[in-house]
Image (tube, rainbow, N blue to C red):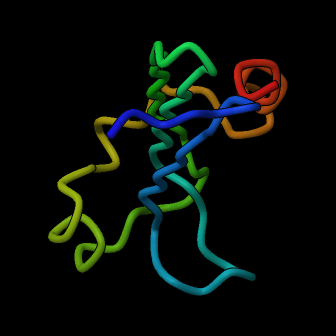
């Protein structure tokens, strides 16, 4: 059954350095935006967390320090992500 949306619907998936909201950081963000006409747009970004990624987290999501070392920080991409969601 197709969705009958009156406004776009956005799904956000985060991969992080851990589960503590006050100390852990995002290492990847993926956003799927479904428009009212049913079209989908996807944005995925690696994020440099500016801290080492614990081995236990890398074992879960497979993202290493090396994969994010040249990625932008969340602050650097926050406006771009907000515009995509709007």
- 8 or 71: which is nearer to us? 8
> Which residue: 73% across, 29% down?
85
Relative to residue 70, is residue 49 drawn left or right? right
Q: Please identify the residue farthest to the bottom as the structure is shown.
A: 20
Q: Position of residue 71 (x, y in %)?
A: 50, 27
> Which residue: 24% across, 80% down?
56
Relative to residue 31, is residue 8 drawn left or right? right
Instruction: Reply above or below: 17 against 32.
Output: below
Total of numbered circles in the picture? 0
Instruction: Reply above or below: 20 against 26.
Output: below
The C terminus, quarter of image? top right
Q: Position of residue 26 (x, y in %)?
A: 56, 55
Instruction: Reply above or below: 37 against 30.
Output: above
> Which residue: 48% across, 16% down?
41
Where, by quadrant of the figure, is residue 77 drawn?
top right
Q: Position of residue 13 (x, y in %)?
A: 46, 52
Instruction: Reply above or below: 45 against 26.
Output: above
- 7 or 79: which is nearer to us? 7
> Which residue: 61% across, 51% down?
50
The N terminus, quarter of image? top left
Relative to residue 17, is residue 24 drawn left or right? right
Relative to residue 29, is residue 76 drawn left or right? right
């Amino acid at each position: 059954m197709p969705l009958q949306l009156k406004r776009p619907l956005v799904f956000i998936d985060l991969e992080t350095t851990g589960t503590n909201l006050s100390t852990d950081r995002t290492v990847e963000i993926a956003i799927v935006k479904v428009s009212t006409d049913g079209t989908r747009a996807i944005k995925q970004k690696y994020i440099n967390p500016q801290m080492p990624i614990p081995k236990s987290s890398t074992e879960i999501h497979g993202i290493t320090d090396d994969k994010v070392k040249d990625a932008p920080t969340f602050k650097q991409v926050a406006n771009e992500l907000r515009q995509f969601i709007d």
